[in-house]
Image (spheres, grey):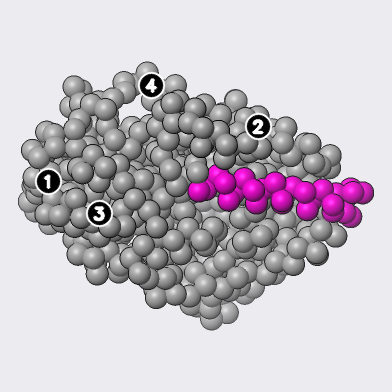
Amino acid sequence: MDAISDSRSLDGADVVVVGGGFGGLSTACYLSGAGADVTLLEKNGQLGGRASRLEVDGFRFDMGPSWYLMPDVFERFFAHFDHEPADYYDLTRLDPHYRIFFKDGDRVDMVPDLEQNRRVFESYEPGAGERFDDYLEKSKTNYEVGMEHFVYEDRTSVRDFLDWDVAKNARGLSLIGSMQRHVEKYFDHPKLQQIMQYTLVFLGGAPTNTPALYNLMSHVDFNMGVYYPENGLGGVVDGIVSLGEELGVDFRTDAPVTEIRGHQGAFVVRTERNDGRPGSGEEFYPDYVVSDADYRHTEMELLPPENRQYDADYWDSRTYAPSAFLLYLGVEGDVDPLEHHTLVLPTDWDEHFDRIFDDPAWPEDPAYYLCVPSETDDSVAPEGHSNLFALVPIAAGLEDTPELRAEFRDLVLDDIEENTGVALRDRIVVEESFCVNDFSERYNSTNGTALGLAHTLRQTALFRPPHRSSAVDGLYFTGSFTTPGIGVPMCLISGQLTAEAMIERAG
């Protein structure tokens, strides 16, 4: 099935995994399955990293990821351990997948029925229905070839890409060029272009700087479907943690790591207490260390200078995925006509991306996402109430003050009412916000990015930081800064790639 399947080359090895996001959880499972004794150290009181949960007065919010996409990745992950997702959580396919409100008053649903979606595309532009089919065919090819030969295989050098087998499989793939140019070949209408590009929000990029290869996300969206897991994304975290416990992983929460020193066979990992009790924390002496913490934070804050691969100039030169302004709202009554997943988009969103990547500033006419899990799951809100969060992508590193948040909160609530018809202001019974400073403080996130390194043309595949440190034997990295990149499925796969790199080296 994969390179780890029959390996026991790590039997008896002690491994510390720093950070309990999806990348860390995945790596811990694979390494434990390969015979290692794994201890995972998580800074916060919950496992899951950005997939944390907020519970207030009977409301339960997924604080981070909320879309369950690419079900095949989860199936493949659990199958490695002779399980399936259904052993840990149930799935509900959403219908519609999502609703879009355009700010000119137009509204459109994307649904599981491809024929219905085809008619929607044709209604905007003659011939677009047929081109919709062509686009999805190309997207499916990119997905099937790209996943098997580029995503599940960690190609770390230019030589890897010059291999004949790679060249043969890459023939016809959209490896160069931007998503903007690729989509323009199929559709002229700006709204159709936006529908095909909205998933860039999950990749942390813009249409002009994200490689065309990521048109594969349309296959994920239209052909594979959008799902809701039982108990939300937090339920998926619980499932993977349960699997890890079955495999023997020792999970430690409230254990922020403050220092990593040494090398393979002679590491020292120091923590401090984070649970309010007196004491100085603990020391661990593993043979190997894997960091799922923010890559820059690990290199610049946890390692001594002589053990760093990159300096501050390198990290300052990177393009970071957006941060986010989030409002978690418990609301009296229903919030019709919002769906479980709702997007609110300006008819021209160039300015929105300009204010994220080119001229960073709080957006005046934002594009944003609304999640209403109470449309699907009665357990996330008290009876007679709705559970809603609003997520506005904003530039990483923006100034974040209480005054700016309050001002932007009012702008967002007004915008929701104006463009969806849903008045929230007088019905809010629970309200919490989360923004740049919170991402930095809770997750040690560089510039408060909500996602990691953006998937720009210069930060894809071998141009992302490596899984294996070139400066310290026995130190490895996993998660959204590494390959294959951003998003829950990608981080699960990152865990596999990191484990494979360790096993290959140990063998």
What is the spatial separation of the Cα atoms under label 4 and label 1, in whole angstroms? 29 Å
Q: Along the horizontal axis of the image, is 22 left or right of 222?
A: left
Residue depicted at 57% across the width and 66% down the height: 227
| Depicted 189 relative to depicted 311: above or below | below
Are discs 4 and 3 less than 8 Å apart at CB?
no
List the residue tagged with mark 1.
286
For the record, the magenta segment spans 122-148
List the residue tagged with mark 2.
178
List the residue tagged with mark 3.
7
For badge 3, the amino acid type reads Ser
What is the spatial separation of the Cα atoms under label 4 and label 2, in whole angstroms? 24 Å
Secondary structure of residue under mark 1: loop
List the residue tagged with mark 4.
314
Q: In the rendered structure, which disc, 4 or 1, sits on the residue that comes first in sequence?
A: 1
| Depicted 218 relative to depicted 97: above or below | above
Whether residue 327 is visible here, answered yes or no, is yes
For badge 2, the amino acid type reads Ser
What is the spatial separation of the Cα atoms under label 4 and label 3, in whole angstroms? 36 Å
